[in-house]
Each structure stands twice: as C-alpha cells, then as structure tokens.
Image (cartoon, helix red, strand yellow):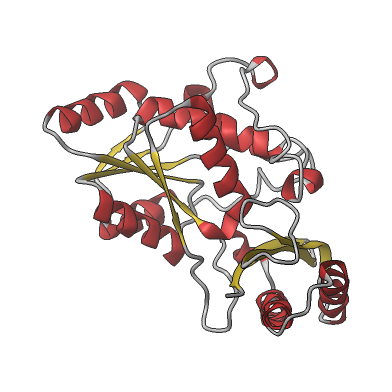
Amino acid sequence: MLQTDSIESLREHVAIWRAAGARIGFVPTMGNLHAGHVQLIEVARTHCERVVASIFVNPLQFGPNEDFTRYPRTPEADCAALESAGADLVFMPSVATMYPQPLEQLTRVSVPQLGDILEGAHRPGHFDGVTTVVARLFNLVQPDVAVFGEKDWQQLAIIRRMVDDLGWPIDIVGVPTVRDADGLALSSRNAYLTAAQRAMAPSLARTLNEVAGHLRVGERDFAALERAATLVLAEDGLRADYVSIRRPDLREPHLGDAQLIILAAAWLGSTRLIDNLPVSLG
C-alpha cells in the first residue's frame, strides 16, 4: 500500500490508475480506525479496482470546546488496518497541506437547513467543517465512488445533498452501522469511555430498539415516544441532546410513512455518543 502526505503524489498515482481504466473508490477517515472503517474499505473494493483512504483529523469540524487536541491519533495501526483491508493508497496530509490559507480566511462549503438541525443545532458549524473538508478531498482524489458509514446518518445525507447540488459525478455508498455484540455502535470516541461507562453505553442502542418496537405495533405519537426515550436514557445514566424520529431524508415524519429513522445523541460522562436506527413499518 502506498502512503503519501503530498497532493502531487496523490494525484500522480490516481492519474496513472485512471489512465489504466480503473474506477477509483475513496474512504475519508479521521483515523483511530475500528472494524467499521475496515468494512468501508472492503465495500469500496467491491465497487472499484483502486481504493484511496485518507486520514486527517479535521480542525474545521471541531467546536472550540470539543476534543480536537485529544482526538486519538494512531497512524501506524491505521495504516496496517487499511493495508490489510485492501486499500491501495492512504493520503495523510498535514493541516497546512489541506488548508493553505488561515482557517478564518478559508472558502467554506455549506449545506443549509439540512446541516442546521439535530447534530447541526447542537454543534454549530460542525457540518460546514465536514462538507468543506470532504469537498476538498473529493476535488483532490476525484473518486468515482465514495463510501461512508450510516452511523453518521445526517452526515451521509448532507454529503449526498452536496454532491447532488454541485453536480459531482460521484456515487455515494452508505454502509450499515457496525456494532459490538452488546449493540453499541462502533466509534473512535468509544475509547474515551471508562469501564463502568462502557457497560452503560449499550443503553443508547437498546432505547432506539424500544422506540422502534413501539412504532412497529402502531404507536404514532412521535413526540411522546421521543420524550419517553429521553427519560429512559436519563434513568440509565445518559443525558440526551436529542431523540428524534424522522423520515430517512430527515424531514418531519407523517403518520402514514412506511420508512422512518430514529436518531439520538447522548452524553455519557464527558463522551458524546450518537446512533440511529432505520425502521420499516410495512
């Protein structure tokens, strides 16, 4: 597997592969990889002959009081995992390489409205940072296919909207959430949890499944279900930022909808967990 921190080297290798007729897949990450990231690489490989991954902890998507400085950075283990999963090249740029202008002067990409609800309401500016870095990475790699995890459902929806609005010829592929045996969605931030908190964390997925069960038996008082789930999480030691039942495109639900998604974010100590659960109602 090739490794580079150079835009010129990245473009050179991609150009050679494309000239040979290869389709290019791309998986952007912030590193500290887990089995969910590995699956993204494996899925990308099924769509493409060549797969590029990136490792970049993006300062633009962290708020002033968030965990940018302590976010886990494990490049050697990450590269080993990427190579084992079948990546052909990993791009590991510095902040100066990604953002040659001072951050406050940087051109930004924004997806309004969709980026202002749920996570966007609780983390102002977060999704502008996500769309800006993904847009730059897309321009550098110019992939045919890009693969993202469905655990960040809102992020995936926003990236799809950005690609559609800007007319980029990139197929966006979502991959279902990978979970531990007890249901906890895999996340790099799970490493922050103490042993006691880790034992409590599956409450988030369990609560989403309980809400789904109520929906499947015909309950449709969405607001009441959201309030009840928030109370259940509090009883289990988690402080919810939100529990929200939405359509898959994140619009408000209607009584006759056959497809819904339950989204939640909750604090467990100083660690913020997010999760979601799609629900088919037949």
Q: 148 or 239: nearer the eye?
A: 148
Determine the residue positioned at 50% across, 33% down.
Answer: 164
Say if residue 236 shows up in the picture: yes
Quarter location, residue 270: bottom right
The quadrant in which the C terminus is found is bottom right
Residue 103 position in % (x across, y down): 65, 21
Say if residue 34 shows up in the picture: no
Determine the residue positioned at 29% across, 25% down.
Answer: 11
Q: Is residue 47 left or right of residue 195?
A: left
Residue 121 position in % (x across, y down): 80, 45
Determine the residue positioned at 21% across, 26% down.
Answer: 15
Residue 159 position in % (x across, y down): 54, 40
In the figure, 244 relative to 89: above or below? below
Q: 142 or 257: nearer the eye?
A: 257
Q: Is residue 31 left or right of residue 20?
A: right
In the figure, 218 relative to 134: above or below? below
Determine the residue positioned at 47% across, 23% down.
Answer: 97
Q: 259 or 263: nearer the eye?
A: 259
